[in-house]
Image: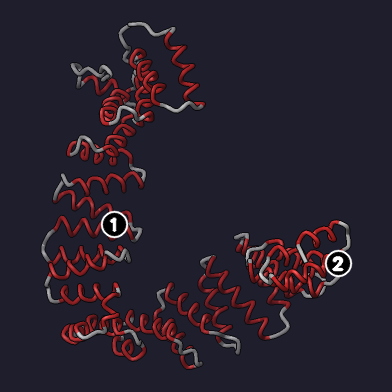
Amino acid sequence: MSMVTAQQYEENEEYEKAFEEYKTILSKRPEDSEVLERLGHLAIILNKEDEAEEFYNKLLELDPKNELAYEQLMDIYISKDKYKYYISRGNLHIVKEEISHALNDFKKALSKADSDRKIASARFILATLYERLDKNNNAIDEYLRVTESDFANEITFLNLAHVYYKEDAISSAIETLERAVERGFDSDIIKENLAKLYTLNNDHEKTREVTSNELVKIKSYLDEGNDEKAYELLNNIDESYKKDPQYFILMAQYHFNKEEWDKSFEYVDQFAQYGQNAALVYQMKALIYEGKNMEFESHLFWARYNLVRGNKDVALNEYYIANKEKDNDPELLRELAELLDDMGDKVQAGEFWQGLVNINPTDKKALERVAEFKESIGDYRGEIEYLEKLYDLNKKNTIVIKKLAVACEKTKQKQLALEYYKKYLENSLMDDEHERIKQKVRQMEGSVSNEVPADDDGLIGKIVRLFSKNKSYLKKLKK
């Protein structure tokens, strides 16, 4: 028994022998995808479609994204089972991320279903596909039909409740999970999700009735305003809960409610160490700073909170307000400049990067961004000024050296450009770009003279020079 023997039989077109040999191998290696694939192929050759179907379905159990298996099953089903044919074709489209095509296939499968079980199965997949296409109302309709059948399971109820939640229909989500419990689906996952929905609906008593999580019960007391009961439970809670990040955020909430700002902040920091829910951390810190009347810090953290939540315009406004309170904070300037860059406002971003350079003249990222901004508006002499600062920080940075050479060329400072190109060759790797620059240096060496550099450095450069006539931009390279 060996793969070599089976393959030899197959190559010699002794398909029955190869088939039996592969089956023997499969009995010893039941999760061997290659063997299953060979068996499926040979079963089709030998007109053993039932066995081929079995092998390809086992292959899909091991590898649900195996496109070949779906294609072979489609060939098997096309003439004998249209329901399975459309199911297989739909699954193949899902694997290929062709969701709209998959949706059409499952609709066709539904029309070919000949049992309630098959109908429920097709409707469930249709619902999930509608969700992926953000057609939540259609998804709700399909999930509802499944929950009304005898073939609903707890996943159906959970998915339906989740779609209602996304549509802000909290009452409908609650009703869905309550029906699940009535139908006998009273697992912990159903109950804890129901408890979360009761909390969102401010029904704290019902939250405590269904949850078995002590931390959820404590939160319900805090949300209800019963701080003393919550604190009593926090002090007597099982030690295992004190390793849960939620314990620290609940302690923070308790001290916040008591206006014990520093203590609350301490617990928020402990919660933050777990690396979970950055938005909640920023929100809590913003609220604490509000309580302490620290306007700058409050707006800074509200900006961070909204940025994490994806509300860039709101975050930008909070950053601007914070900047009015304190316009020389390096962290604020950097975050504001990065946000403006991300939003495509390069002019405003350039101003804040410049502000950061003014505070810290050795900040590499800020220098890079200011140089890029100067280049983008045609102020090549200004670009050179900041590139030279970067060069002073690291004289072997070939990216900076090359940019300096190019900028010097643009401002007709050919001799200085040549020197920078040579510096680039001294520090760069021997690659295609190195060879290109080497050729360029040869050409420049034959044409560079000692003539005075021309003033053709872009419109912005001309304007800048009107205000800085006495400033020299031609600097000697530091050896």
Q: Amino acid at mark 2?
A: Lys
Task: Give the residue at x 68% y 61%.
Answer: 67
Give neighbour class at mark 1: few <14, some 14-19, many 20+ (Cα, 10 Å). Answer: some
Can I make out residue 212 in this image?
Answer: yes
Which residue sits at x=26%, y=77%? Answer: 242
Residue 361 lies, in percent from the top left, at 20, 35
* Mark closest to the chain's N terminus, 2 or 1: 2
Q: Position of residue 374 (x, y in %)?
A: 31, 30
For residue 312, which quarter of the picture? bottom left
Report the quarter where the C terminus lies: top left
Q: Residue at the location (77% across, 71% down)?
A: 24
On the image, the x and y values in percent for residue 147 come to 55, 85
Q: CA distance from mark 2 to mark 1?
A: 71 Å
Q: Is residue 439 above or below residue 175?
A: above
Q: Which amino acid does the dot numbered 1 rest on?
A: Val
Quarter of the image where one finds residue 222:
bottom left
Marks 1 and 2: in contact by CB < 8 Å? no
What is the total number of numbered labels drawn onto the structure image? 2
Q: Which mark is residue 314?
A: 1
Q: Secondary structure at mark 2?
A: helix
Give the secondary structure at mark 1.
Answer: helix
Q: Which residue is mark 2?
A: 17
